[in-house]
Structures are given as structure tokens and as C-alpha cells.
Amino acid sequence: MDILQIDPIAGLVSLIALVFSIFAAYKSVSNEKYKQNRADYVVIETSFVQLEMSLKDRPGALKFHNVNIEDINKIGISIEEFSYLLANFTLGGIDYREKLITDDKPELTNYRIKMLHSQDTRNAWPMLKKMMSDTLYTDLIEEEIKKINEIELLKNSEQTKISSEPIEEEYNS
């Protein structure tokens, strides 16, 4: 009398099902751990934003980033505006890093690009960058600023050329 007789094909199918079940359970736990890590990251980064906004109340802390209030004042913005810009670009960095999960090369948002069209924002950027890590995000900002500055230079040179033409005609007459 056979105590236990297993069909080889049924045994193989059961073994494959067991392996897939273990793999699925591992992926599920791994995915949950990943989601929790992402959520923790966003909470930590958001805390940085709150800390950066507090710089308006503690401008002396800027010295830890090799930035001083006099330099901020020289470019014509207040410490409150600088804190706002820093927090805003930090949030942009958080958004950018989140997009990197699903997109190999995310772009700057129109919101950030429009901000960079402000001369005050571009003037503040070198000091803002001192307070941020060098990343693909900051590289994109640098590239965008360079493009905007080139366009502004081109516009200004065309306007200068147009405004100087009547003077040259009058001079030559």
C-alpha cells in the first residue's frame, strides 16, 4: 500500500506555484518598504522647506552656507523673499526627484521656468545654489538661466540696434 503517491506533473506545478507565491510576497513587502521610504523622504524634505522658510527669522544662519544678508540686500531682495525662493526651489527639487522614479529625464515645470524669467530670481540663484546640493535639477536650472540670459542679451542688442539706426541716419544726413 502506497502511503503517498504524487503525480510528477502536479508536483512540479505545485512547486512552481509555491516559488511564484514566495516571489510575489517578497515583491509586495519590498514595494511597501519602497513606498514607506519614499513617504519618509518627502516628509524629511518638506521639513527642510519649513526650516528654510525660518531663515527670515534667523538670517544669521545664512553664514553656515557662505551667504550673508548684505549680499542678499545687494541684489535687491529681502530675506523674506530669499527664504521664499529657497523653499520654492527646494520643493521643485523634491518634485523633480519624485519624477525621476518614472521619467529618465524630467523637465523643469513651467512654474519654475516662469520664475526664472524674473531677473530678481536669476540674480538670487548663485546664493540659492550655495544652499542646495548639486543635482540634475540644479543643472537644469543653470541651463535654463543661461538660455534666458542669452535671449535677453539678444533682445537687448536688437533693441539697441533698432534705437541707434535713426541716430546714424540723422548723423549721415
Image (cartoon, helix red, strand yellow):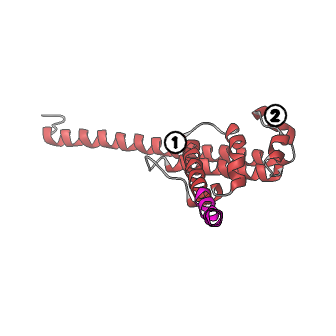
**Which quadrant would residue 36 be assigned to in this image?**
top right
What type is the residue that disc 1 sits on? Lys
Give the residue at x 48% y 51%.
106
Prevailing secondary structure of the magenta residues:
helix
Residue drawn 57% across the image and 55% down it: 154
**Which comes before the other along the chain, label 2 or label 1?**
1
Q: Is residue 11 magenta?
A: no
Where is residue 103 drawn, in percent x and y?
A: 44, 50
**Image location of residue 30, percent across then percent down:** 46, 41
In what element is the residue under mark 1? Answer: helix
Residue situated in front as seen by the camera: 157 or 22? 157
Q: Residue 63 has which mark?
A: 2
- In the rendered image, the vertical position of residue 122 relative to residue 60, given as above or below: below
Q: Is residue 30 left or right of residue 122?
A: left
Q: Is residue 47 above or below residue 64?
A: below
Crowdedness near tag 2: few (<14), some (14–19) or many (≥20) residues, C-alpha within 10 Å: few
Determine the CA span between mark 2 and mark 1.
38 Å
- How crowded pointer 1 is (Cα within 10 Å; few <14, some 14-19, many 20+) is rated as few
Image location (x, y in percent) of residue 52: 76, 45
Residue 41, label in figure:
none
In what quadrant of the picture does the C terminus appear? bottom right
Mark 1 lies on residue: 33
Closest to the camera, between mark 2 and mark 1, is 2
Residue 164 colored in magenta in the image: yes
